[in-house]
Every structure is written in C-alpha cells, then in structure tokens.
C-alpha cells in the first residue's frame, strides 16, 4: 500500500491560484487518485479524481477552475487551483483507491492533508 504526502497549501487572495502536489512512496500506476477537501464544520467532500488511464472527474463546485493531473513515472498527483474563492478554504487531502475510481468509498489510503486558505 502506498503512503501519500501532500504539499503546496497556503494562504492566497480570492481570485488567485495554487498548486497542490501529492507524492506517493510507491508506484501509483495501478491506483485511481483523488483530491478531497474538508472545511471547518463540514464533511469531507470529493474535489476531483483521475483514473489510471487519466480520465478525470470534477465536483461541480470546482469544474472549470481546478485541474487534476498525475505523473505515474514520478508517482505524483497534482491539483491546480485557480480563480480561488473564500469557500474553497479547507484542508485538502489526496487519496488513492485500488479500484472503482468514481466510488468515493473505495479511497482508503490518505495523506495527512494540507491547508488552503482563501482570503476575501
């Protein structure tokens, strides 16, 4: 099972951009990868997923603003966040699933999270 470590969070003004990166300890080739987020007082929610063959899915709230990508050679998955809004403030987690890339319950390997704060 891979281990995941996120980086790249921080404080940004509304309208700005950030790139989050997640590095895996082992090969991610056979895994679906995703980014989730959890805002204070709210449940964790799916932000974006990318399958082994690079199909992508985005939550409606981020579609057109966020881009997920993966590099299997480097065992990384990135999330580029643009046109950021205060409501994007959350802890962002990367996750891996051995199967079923669109089923959130299949994501059972998690990073420790990285904070993204968007000021208005």
Image: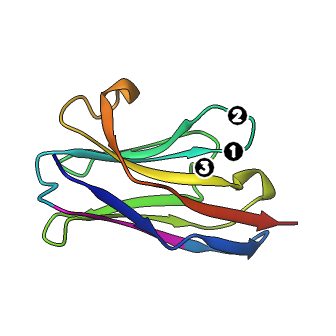
Specify start and end residues of the magenta stretch as a single range: 19-25
Asked whether, in this view, residue 102 is left or right of residue 67, the answer is left
CA neighbours of label 3 inside 10 A, class few (<14), some (14 to 19), many (20+): some
What residue is shown with label 2?
A: 42
Residue at 75% in and 36% down:
41
Q: Is residue 81 above or below residue 57?
A: below
What residue is shown with label 3?
A: 62
Q: Earlier in the sequence, mark 1 or mark 3?
A: 1
Which SS type dominates the magenta stretch? strand
Residue at 79% in and 69% down:
14
Residue at 24% in and 52% down:
54
SS state under label 2: loop
Contact between marks 1 and 3 (CB within 8 A): the answer is: no
Q: Is residue 79 above or below residue 2?
A: below
Q: Is residue 11 above or below residue 93?
A: below
Give the spatial CA distance, label 2 vs label 1: 5 Å
CA neighbours of label 1 inside 10 A, class few (<14), some (14 to 19), many (20+): some
Give the spatial CA distance, label 1 vs label 3: 14 Å
Contact between marks 2 and 1 (CB within 8 A): the answer is: yes
Q: Earlier in the sequence, mark 2 or mark 3?
A: 2
What residue is shown with label 1?
A: 39
Residue at 76% in and 59% down:
85
Q: Is residue 74 above or below residue 102?
A: below
């Amino acid at each position: 099972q891979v281990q995941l470590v996120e980086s790249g969070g921080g404080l940004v003004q509304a309208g700005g951009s950030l790139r989050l990166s997640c590095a895996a300890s082992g090969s991610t080739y056979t895994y679906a990868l995703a980014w989730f987020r959890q805002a204070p007082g709210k449940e964790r929610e799916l932000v974006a997923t990318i399958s082994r063959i690079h199909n992508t899915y985005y939550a409606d709230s981020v579609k057109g603003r966020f881009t997920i990508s993966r590099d299997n050679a480097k065992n990384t998955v990135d999330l580029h966040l643009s046109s950021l809004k205060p409501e994007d403030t959350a802890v962002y987690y990367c996750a891996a699933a051995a199967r079923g890339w669109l089923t959130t319950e299949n994501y059972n390997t998690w990073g420790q999270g990285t904070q993204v704060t968007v000021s208005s």
